[in-house]
Image (tube, rainbow, N blue to C red):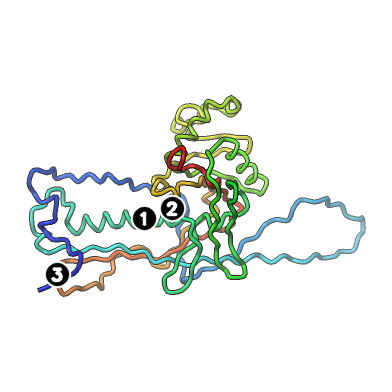
Amino acid sequence: MAVISNTFQSPSAKGNREELSDVVNRIDPEDTPIYSMISKGSTNSTNPEWETDSLSAPAANAQLEGDQYTFGATTPAVRMRNYTQIMRKDGILSKTQEAVSNAGKAEQLKYQKLKKGVELRKDIEFAIVSNTASVGGATRFFGGLPSWIATNVSRGATGANGGYNTGTNLTVAETPGTQRAFTKALLDTTMQSGYSNGANFKYLAVSPYVKSVFVTFMSDSNVAAFRYAASNGKNNSIVANADVYEGPFGKVAVVPNRVMATSAAVARRAYLLDPEYLSFLWLRRIAEDKSVTINADANAFVLIGEGTMKVKNEKGLGVIADVFGLTAAT
C-alpha cells in the first residue's frame, strides 16, 4: 500500500471537531495593492509585444515666411516584450478528511481552493515587486518592476539600473546598492525627475516600515507648506495618518504593501506609480484544471494561470531603491 506524497490525512488535521470554533480566521493579509490598481488584459502569446514612444524635447520653432517644406526623419517606436509566467497552487486531501465533521471547514477542499487562490494572487504581487529579469524558455519569468525602471530612479552607492535590452528583448535585473534611510529629499528628487520626464505619479507603494518612516516627515519644517485638509474626508494629507503627500512636483497616495514586507530583498524599494502605464496580461486566467485525476482515495486540485506584466512606458514610473525597508538597519 502507498499514499501519494503530501496527501493531507485526518490524523494531521487541526480543525476536526473537538472544541474549536466553526469560524476559521485567516490571519494572513490578502492585500495586493499594485496588482489591484492596474488594468487587466489578455494576450495570445507567451511573449507579448507592444510599442512605446515619447515626444521630442521642446525647441525653438520659428519658420521663414513662404519657406519650402522640408521633412525630418520619423523616429520609430521602440518595441517591448515580456514573457508570461506560469503560476500554480495545488492540494490533496483524503476522502476521509472530506467526510468527517470539521470545525471551521479549514481542511475541506472548497476552502483550500479559496485559500490557494488568495495565495496565487499574492504570488503575482510578489513577482511584480521582485528584482527578477525576464526569462524565456520552458520555465519563464516576467520581468518585475525593478528590472524595468531606469529613468526616474534614486539609488544608493554602487547601485545600477537594469532596464530593457532592445538587443535581447529581455529585461535586466538592477544591481542593488548600499542601503540608506528613506527621506523626504529622496522622494522629492525622484518625483522631480518624473515631472521632468512627463510622469504624473499617483501612488507611492512602500513596505509597512517605510510607510511608518514616511509619517515622520510631518515633523519636517519644510513640509508645512504642503499640508492641507483632504476634501473627501477619507484620506489625510501629510498631517495625521499621512496617506497623501503633496510635494513640489505632484501629489501621491502612500500605499503600504504587506507583500513588500516578505523579505529585505523586496522591501528595499519605494515605487512611484501611475497605473495608466501598467497592466497585467493573462494568457490563461487562474482556473482549476479539471483534467486532474489521481488513482487514490483522495481528492486533489490544481489551480493554474499564466500571465505577464506590461510596462507601457517606464518613464511614467519611478523607484527609490536601496532604502531600509524592514527596520532602521535592514
Q: Of callouts 3 and 1, which one flags the residue occurring earlier in the amino acid sequence? A: 3
Q: Are marks 1 and 2 in contact (CB under 8 Å)?
A: yes
Residue kind at label 1, given as amino acid type: Arg
Mark 3 to mark 1: distance in Å?
Answer: 30 Å
Q: Which mark is residue 3?
A: 3
* Residue that badge 2 annotates: 35
Say which residue appears at 60% left-offset and 27% top-offset: 222
**Side (left or right) of 130 relative to 3:** right
Q: Earlier in the sequence, mark 2 or mark 3?
A: 3
For residue 195, above or below residue 81 = above
**Left or right: where 69 falls relative to 47:** right
Q: Residues within 10 Å of mark 3 (few under 14, many from 20)?
A: few
Return the residue at label 1. 121
Marks 1 and 2 sit apart, C-alpha to C-alpha, by 8 Å
Q: How many marks?
A: 3
**Quadrant of the image for the C terminus?**
top left
Image location of residue 218, percent across then percent down: 52, 27
Q: Nearer the viewer, mark 3 or mark 1?
A: 3
Pick whichever, 111 or 163, lies toward us.
163
In the rendered image, residue 274, in percent from the top left (x then y), is placed at 54, 48
Q: Position of residue 197 (x, y in %)?
A: 66, 49
Amino acid type, callout 3: Val
- Asked if the residues shown at circle 3 and circle 1 are in contact, with their CB atoms under 8 angstroms apart, the answer is no
**Residue ID at (8%, 43%):** 19
Question: Residue 151, which numbered label?
Answer: none
Which element type, helix, strand or loop, lies under badge 1? Answer: helix
- Dot 1 or dot 2: first in sequence order is 2
Q: Say which amino acid is labelled 2.
A: Tyr
Look at 51% across and 45% down and name the residue there. 270
Instruction: Assign a secondary structure to mark 3.
Output: loop
